[in-house]
Each structure stands twice: as structure tokens, then as C-alpha cells.
Image: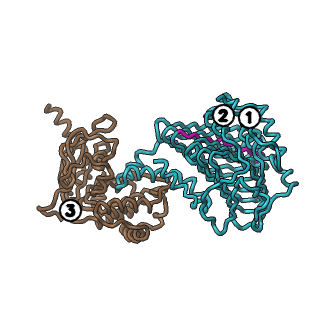
């Protein structure tokens, strides 16, 4: 079936606009109709496997379902867990701990959509798909006195597509550990739009575990973060096991004077395609960025990284470092890494680099010369390679056993 | 102590080996018995490190002809890990840094693979920690190095101590120590040398590859071999190393010239 037909059918299959996101839904659908489906002539989608995107659009959007089944590890005592489960209208009824509360309508009106809009990505299909299909919103305010960590889990539903929208406002001076977990299922799709606003002096440590489930599970996630001055934001994420995944972190330092750390790992096997398209923009001086993008591609898989950094005239004394390090484990696998630095300010220090290599023979020999067999030596080296990202994930991430899955899947 | 009944641990006969299609070893012969300490000296590029890597089974090197036997067993078909498990240890000239792999975990996995071969029980984390801390004393190494990634950010001396620690844990029958003395200051050299001395057993043997006499002041070799152009061209006792320190390697060029003139 032609892409345009699938696209049209997907739009037609959407339920009527309704709920608190009614306006957003109309907007998203109008934009999709206006823009049409992207092609490989659009730079941001040039390397996309459109067959996978078509599969993504072929699954019915789920609003209500009675058969949601999943098994989750126990949560930490000191953690607030929210499960986004599309068979209930749970956002209206969740009990929240002290220090975290739902945003009121005025706050939602004031903030929603603004951060993602300010990223101005051309042909913003990922966002439009979400806007068109998300019917509920989880909008939370994290206060200074919130002393737990926050966990947001989104399981998939077999043979269905789900769409989630989250807005988090982290109030001035708050410190938060946030862990988000996306879980795939066979023949399932997820589409997330997350907006986070960090007020000044906020420290947010954000872990994101995005684990697909082998057969035709796909995920599209846009994460838009706005940082006020003197805020610290760190994002550590892992994407693995998706047949098709696209992750778009977009971070705006709205006044500069903030610090951003991004360490992202994507690991592919089989014929999977996982792409990260990041954008970091400094809207004021003295901003700092430390970005590390790691990819491991095995078998016939494909990893993509597009890393944009924008430093306009007003962002003097910006210090930004971007490094893309990639491991190619098979001759048939493919890695595309493209840094894109747009620097107008003249008094800045910006560095970038990209490497693609294989597991180092000398490292392997060293381990083998100590009696460690080839397979074990390989997995030790891979674990070491992942460690630079996963060792920074919040402690509670260990319960999700993703390292075990990684070690089992990639040898 | 060398006894006439001592078993031969390593026997190398007419070994020719290449790397990147270039022949480096042109017929090495060497026999090492239990309890013996051998020193191999020679200029850069004479084939010393190649010999050590070929014995350990580095996959980039190809054996063209000849044989290597370990305790009577031909080892050329064995993978590097199999050679290590039966008791062959290579102390690296440049120990490799492996970010993200914990030194403790690495040492434990390596030790257990050797113990398995020796039909000893595998050590769990706690048992291993006790053992490794005890062995670290041999090289006066701080247990803090266990928490770090393998060799990452270690100074030259710390890397070499980590190598000798591995030797202490793996208890090999033969240790080939490739320029263990390079990059060490006098104090570190003494600590490393004393560690090697403490670890030598009547049932094991050591091959020291070195450029300098100073290591041999600390560890007395039974035999000193001089390598040139991929061959052992001269074998003697400790006096040979002392002579070499005084007169250098010029005699090799002289011998070569004489040979060419005769031909």
C-alpha cells in the first residue's frame, strides 16, 4: 500500500476530537493534512525506513482497552510511580504524594505546547502525529518539597498504538530524579510527546529506558525541555529492541547560564532502525553542554544520529561539546552520524567529533590472554562500552533488567 | 632451583612467524625448564615482543613454521584464552586500558577461568575480594585500584603492578614479562621485581624481556639470550647481560659484517 494511502487511512481512523486536548488534536490533524507525509527528500527524514513508519501508522490507535497486561518490577520505597495505562481515565484520579500535584487549567493553558513550538523543527511530523492522536494529558507540577524520585512507566499494548502526552513543570529550586520507562510489546507502537520546564535553580536528573519487544514494536518520542537560568538538566537514555524508533530530544536554554548533560545510547540488532535527532539551542550567554551519543549496531541494523547545536549571537561564552562514538559490530550494519553546529556567536568554545569503530582487537586479546573466552571478552567490552551511559541512570533503573537483555541480545 | 630432573615447560623449535605478511621471527629456538629464569635482551625491533605475543597466541601473528610446546603439548592450535588457562602468562609491555570494565570483575573472571582449569572451585565475589587483597600486598598495591576500570588512568607503574597482580592471581607455570621494567622509577622497579621474585616457584619459570641490566640486578637470571633479526644469536649467563651493558649491541653488527664478508 502507498505511504500516502496509509497516512490518510491513519488520519481517518482517529476518533473525533475530544477531551482536554481537543484543540491540540485539531491542530495536529490540520498540520498533518497540510504537510503530508515526509519523504526521503526531507533532511530530517532522509534516512528513515518508511516501511517501518508505515507499519507504525498501520496499527489502530487505542483509546480504551480492557486487555492491558504487563508485569512490572516492584517500585522503590522512595519512589512515586505513575503507570500510563490507556484503559482508564487515570490521570483524573491519581493520588499523588506531597510535593507533586496536577497543574490547573490556567497553568496548562499558559505552558502546553510552548516549549515544543519554540524548537521550530521543520516538518515536525513526530509532534504532529502525537498532537493528532493524544487524547489525555498528564500535567504535573513538582515542588521544592517533593522528596521522592518519580517514575513514569508506559507499557505497550499488543497490536495497538498508543499516544501519550506529558507536561512536567519543575518549580524553582527543586531537585528531582525522574525515570521514564517505555516498554514495547509485539506488534505495538508508542508515540510520546514530553515537555518539561525547569524553572531557575532546578536540578533534574532524567533517566529514560526505552525497550522494545522484538517483533514490530516501534516508538516515536519527542522530548522538549526548557531550562531557565542556573538550572541543571542531565538526560541519560537507552533505546534498544525496537524494530523502529525515533527519539528527538530538544533542549532550549532559554536564558543561557544553565548546564545540560546528555548521554544517549542506542543499540540495534537484526534489521532494526533506531534514530536520535537532537537539538540543543542556547538563547543566552554562558550556557554549558556536554553531549555524548553512543551507538552499537549489529547484524543488519541501522543507527542514526543527527545532532544539532545552535549558538546564536546572544549566546556568547557558550561551552558546548558533542561527541558521537559508535561501534559497528557487523559488516552489514550501518551507522550514520551527523553533527550540525550552527554558531553565530564569536566568543564560544564548541567542539564536536564522531568516531565509528569496531571492538578493539588489542582489548579483546588482553582479556583473552587472561583466560577469558572470546564471547565473554566481547560481552565484557560491550558492557564497558554501555557503562559510560547506563552507570548514570537513576539507581532504580537496575530493577528493569535492561542490561541483562542487552547482554543477551548483542554478542 | 634447577634440578637435572626438572621438567621442560616451554620448548620452542625453529619458530618462524610473521605479522602483516612480514616475517619477524626467523627461526627461534628456546627451551625453558621448571625453576628457571631466562632473560631475553636485544635491540628494538629484534623480535622480542613478537616472540612473546606468538607464545601467548595473539591472532594478528601467523606462525609460518616450527613448533611451540608447553609441558609437552603442542599449543599452536590453542586460542589465547586456552593458553592462559593451562598456565601461560604474558605480562604486557603496554597494558591495555578498558574503560567501563571493573578491574575487580575482570580479575575475578580471569582468576576463575584459571581455577576451573585447575579443577579448583570458582570464587564468589566475597571470597575473591579476600584473595585479591592478600595478593595485592605482594606488589604494594592500593585496594582502591580494584574499584576502577581496568588500567584506566593508571600510571605506568600502577599498570605494571596490576600486571604482576594478575600473575599472582593466575599462578601460571610460565610468565613472559615483556619489558615490565620500562617506565618504572627505581622504587617501583624494586617493588615489581620483588613481587616477581616472591612469585617464582620451583615448578614455574619466568622469561624476562628487557633492555636493561637494572632489572637483572633485582632478579638474577639463569640464562641470558640475545635476540637479533628474529633469532636468538647468543646465550650466556648473567655475565652476558653485564658485558652487554658495557659494550652495547655493536658486536651484532660486527658479526653480521664478518659473516657477509665470508659469504
For residue B29, say whether it is visible: yes
Give the chain of mark 2.
A
- Colour seen for chain A: cyan
Q: Residue B159, how many percent across, how many down?
A: 41, 57
Q: Secondary structure at mark 3?
A: loop
For residue A395, say whether it is visible: no
The residue identified by callout 2 is A45
Magenta stretch: includes residue A282? yes
Image mark for residue A123: 1
| Residue A398 in the figure: left or right of residue B221 | right
Rendered view: A333 above or below A392? above
Question: Disc 2 to disc 3, how far (Cα)?
Answer: 68 Å
Give the chain of mark 1.
A
Residue farthest to the front, as pictured: A66
Q: What coloring was used for the rendering?
A: by chain
Using the rendered view, name the quadrant where residue A36 is placed. top right
Question: Disc 1 to disc 2, how far (Cα)?
Answer: 9 Å
Using the rendered view, name the quadrant where residue A75 is placed. bottom right
- Colour seen for chain B: brown
* Residue stretch in magenta: A271-285
Q: Give me the residue at 26% from left, 50% from top.
A: B41
Q: Are marks 1 and 3 on the same chain?
A: no
Give the chain of mark 3.
B
Amino acid at each position: 500500500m502507498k505511504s500516502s494511502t496509509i497516512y490518510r487511512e491513519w488520519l481517518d481512523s482517529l476518533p473525533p476530537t475530544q477531551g482536554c486536548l481537543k484543540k491540540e488534536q485539531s491542530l495536529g490533524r490540520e498540520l498533518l493534512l497540510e504537510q503530508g507525509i515526509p519523504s526521503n527528500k526531507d533532511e530530517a527524514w532522509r534516512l528513515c525506513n518508511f516501511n517501518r513508519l508505515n507499519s507504525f501508522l498501520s496499527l489502530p490507535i487505542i483509546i480504551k482497552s480492557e486487555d492491558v497486561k504487563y508485569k512490572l518490577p516492584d517500585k522503590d520505597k522512595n519512589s512515586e510511580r505513575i503507570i500510563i495505562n490507556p484503559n482508564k481515565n487515570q490521570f483524573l484520579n491519581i493520588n499523588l504524594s506531597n510535593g507533586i500535584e496536577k497543574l490547573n487549567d490556567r497553568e496548562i493553558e499558559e505552558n502546553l505546547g510552548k516549549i515544543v513550538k519554540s524548537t521550530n523543527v521543520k516538518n515536525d511530523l513526530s509532534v504532529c502525529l502525537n498532537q493528532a492522536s493524544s487524547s489525555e494529558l498528564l500535567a504535573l507540577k513538582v515542588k521544592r518539597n517533593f522528596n521522592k524520585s518519580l517514575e513514569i512507566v508506559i507499557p505497550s499494548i499488543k497490536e495497538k498504538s498508543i499516544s501519550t502526552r506529558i507536561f512536567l513543570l519543575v518549580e524553582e529550586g527543586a531537585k528531582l530524579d525522574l525515570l521514564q520507562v517505555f516498554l514495547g510489546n509485539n506488534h505495538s507502537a508508542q508515540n510520546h510527546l514530553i515537555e518539561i520546564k525547569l524553572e531557575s535553580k532546578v536540578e533534574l536528573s532524567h533517566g529514560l529506558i526505552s525497550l522494545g519487544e522484538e517483533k514490530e514494536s516501534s516508538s516515536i518520542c519527542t522530548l522538549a525541555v526548557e531550562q531557565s537560568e542556573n538550572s541543571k538538566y542531565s538526560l541519560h537514555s537507552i533505546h534498544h529492541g525496537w524494530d523502529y524508533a525515533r527519539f528527538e530530544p530538544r533542549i532550549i536554554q532559554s536564558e543561557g547560564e544553565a548546564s545540560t548533560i546528555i548521554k544517549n545510547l542506542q543499540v540495534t540488532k537484526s534489521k532494526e532502525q533506531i534514530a536520535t535527532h537532537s537539538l540543543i539551542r542556547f538563547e543566552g550567554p554562558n550556557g554549558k553542554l556536554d553531549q555524548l551519543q553512543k551507538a552499537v549496531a549489529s547484524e543488519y541494523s541501522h543507527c542514526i544520529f543527527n545532532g544539532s547545536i545552535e549558538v546564536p549571537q546572544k549566546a556568547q561564552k557558550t561551552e558546548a561539546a558533542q561527541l558521537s562514538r559508535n561501534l559497528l559490530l557487523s559488516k552489514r550494519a550501518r551507522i550514520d552520524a551527523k553533527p550540525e553546529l550552527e554558531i553565530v556567536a564569536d566568543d564560544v568554545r564548541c567542539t564536536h567529533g564522531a568516531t565509528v569503530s569496531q571492538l578493539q582487537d588489542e582489548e579483546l586479546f588482553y582479556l583473552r590472554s587472561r583466560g577469558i573466552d572470546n564471547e565473554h571478552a566481547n560481552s565484557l567490552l560491550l558492557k564497558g562500552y554501555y557503562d559510560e551511559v547506563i552507570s548514570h541512570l537513576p539507581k532504580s533503573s537496575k530493577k528493569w533488567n535492561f542490561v541483562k537483555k542487552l547482554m543477551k541480545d548483542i554478542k | 632451583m634447577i634440578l637435572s630432573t626438572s621438567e621442560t615447560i616451554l620448548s620452542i623449535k625453529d619458530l618462524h612467524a610473521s605479522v602483516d605478511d612480514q616475517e619477524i621471527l626467523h627461526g627461534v629456538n628456546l627451551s625453558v625448564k621448571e625453576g628457571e629464569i631466562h632473560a631475553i635482551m636485544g635491540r628494538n625491533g629484534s623480535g622480542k615482543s613478537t616472540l612473546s605475543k606468538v607464545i601467548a597466541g595473539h591472532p594478528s601473528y601467523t606462525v609460518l613454521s616450527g613448533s611451540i610446546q608447553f609441558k609437552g603439548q603442542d599449543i599452536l592450535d590453542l586460542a589465547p584464552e586456552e593458553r592462559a588457562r593451562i598456565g601461560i602468562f604474558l605480562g604486557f609491555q603496554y597494558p591495555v586500558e578498558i574503560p567501563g570494565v571493573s578491574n575487580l570483575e575482570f580479575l575475578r573472571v580471569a582468576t576463575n577461568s584459571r581455577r576451573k582449569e585447575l579443577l579448583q572451585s570458582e570464587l564468589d565475589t566475597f571470597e575473591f575480594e579476600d584473595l585479591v587483597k592478600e595478593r595485592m600486598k605482594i606488589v604494594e598495591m592500593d585496594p582502591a585500584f580494584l574499584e576502577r576500570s581496568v588500567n584506566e588512568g593508571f600510571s605506568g607503574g600502577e599498570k605494571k603492578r596490576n600486571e604482576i597482580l594478575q600473575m599472582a592471581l593466575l599462578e601460571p607455570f610460565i610468565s613472559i614479562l615483556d619489558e615490565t621494567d620500562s617506565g618504572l622509577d627505581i622504587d617501583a622497579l624494586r617493588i615489581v621485581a620483588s613481587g616477581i621474585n616472591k612469585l617464582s616457584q620451583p615448578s614455574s619459570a619466568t622469561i624476562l624481556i628487557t633492555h636493561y641490566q637494572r632489572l637483572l640486578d633485582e632478579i638474577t637470571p639463569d640464562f641470558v639470550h640475545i635476540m637479533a633479526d628474529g633469532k636468538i644469536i647468543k646465550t650466556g649467563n648473567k655475565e652476558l647481560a653485564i658485558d652487554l651493558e658495557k659494550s652495547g649491541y655493536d658486536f651484532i653488527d660486527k658479526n653480521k659484517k664478518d659473516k657477509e664478508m665470508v659469504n
